[in-house]
Image (tube, rainbow, N blue to C red):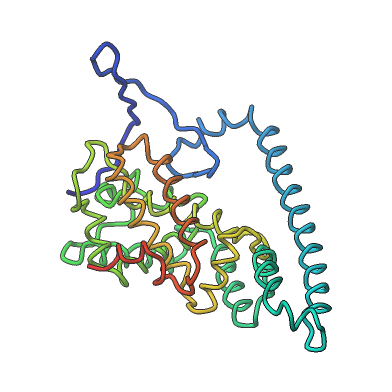
Amino acid sequence: MTSRTLRRRLHHGDVDGKKHEHLVSSDLDDLNEPLLGNNENDNKQSEGNTLEAVWSDEQRKEQLHWTLLFSQLIAEWAQWFANIILGSGSLIGRIFPFSLVTQIGPIRSLLPPPLNPLQETRLKNLQERLEVPFDGSRLEHQDALKQLWRLAYPERELPSLKSELWKEMGWQGPDPSTDFRGGGFISLENLIFFAKTYPEVFQSLLHKNDGERAEWEYPFAVAGINISFMLVQMLDLQSGKPTSMPGIRFLELLSEDAMAFDNLYCVAFQMMDAQWLAKRASYMEFNEVLKSTRAQLERELSLEDISTVKDLPAYNLLKR
């Protein structure tokens, strides 16, 4: 089933056993997805909540700061105490060689670990990619869009960069460049990586081959941009050094795989579609499904013995 772009947003409600339709605009939620909403309406709706959102964000940052500071102090005290009582010459250390080490471990795991040179280099390269906006006037960005089309539809003729045919891929209008907004060029790179690395899964999601699909399906390409944006937020990649637990765990993945972000993107896309089918969702429920996807990813990243993206349970979804 070819993905279709919705020209209007419909909300279906059952009233007295009958379905009624009315137009609604989608609010920005906690994830701040910038791409499935109407820009003008979103801006108007968000004006009244700006101060509240900023205040809430500042409170969260302050709370995180004090939590990390307090944890750091506890960890330093625990390490100092452990060095005293667990030292090789300590009688207590010989009597209780392991009792406190297991208690110190969980405390230390809450703290952002120091980055090794490889992690620093890869994190810097990734953050540099995040800073590149999509620019439809740049030839390399135009060529990337053309590459995505050829990967998606290898047997079809390449359309012009402004054509109604782009809607078949799940862009909201005839000009894909207008859909990137907060996603940046990396979101296009993610789609290309997906198409090249996991072509069967990519094609299945593009054409909506799996499961019983909704009448109002999510647009494939725009959904992909939202997933890139969601991952950047979840992994705290726009800060100098990630301090969220998913971000800290991601740094471990990055040390094993330079393309960890792109591989995690593919897992997240397939996971989102699985959630979509499980919930029997339709277009207006996309943000809810994306939130569920984020929550599941965070749970899997918190599991022990996860050193690469391929260790995640959801990675099995990519195996065809």
The image position of residue 52, as x and y in percent, is 68, 32
Whether residue 171 sits left or right of residue 110 in the image: it is left
Q: Residue most toward the top?
A: 16
Quadrant where the C terminus sits is bottom left
Q: Nearer the viewer, residue 261 or 75?
A: 75
Relative to 65, is 207 on the left or the right? Answer: left
Total of numbered circles in the picture?
Answer: 0
- For the residue pair 178 and 222, the one nearer the viewer reads as 222
- Give residue 23's quadrant in the image: top left
When the figure is inspected, residue 4 is found, relative to residue 67, above or below; the finding is above
Task: State left or right for residue 70 relative to residue 176.
Answer: right
Question: Measuring 53% from the left and 44% from the top, which residue is drawn there?
Answer: 31
Task: Judge whether 94 appears above or below 169 on screen.
Answer: below
Residue 115: x and y in percent read 66, 76
Q: Is residue 296 left or right of residue 78?
A: left
Taking the spot 76% from the left edge, 48% from the top edge, the residue there is 62
User: Residue 231 location in percent, x, y?
Assistant: 50, 57
* Position of 121 relative to 76 (above/below): below
Q: Residue at x 31, y 51 (%)?
A: 273
- Nearer to us in this view, 157 or 223: 223
Question: Could you say where residue 221 lies in the image, as x and y percent from the top left?
Answer: 34, 52
Q: For the point 43% across and 67% down, which residue is it?
A: 262
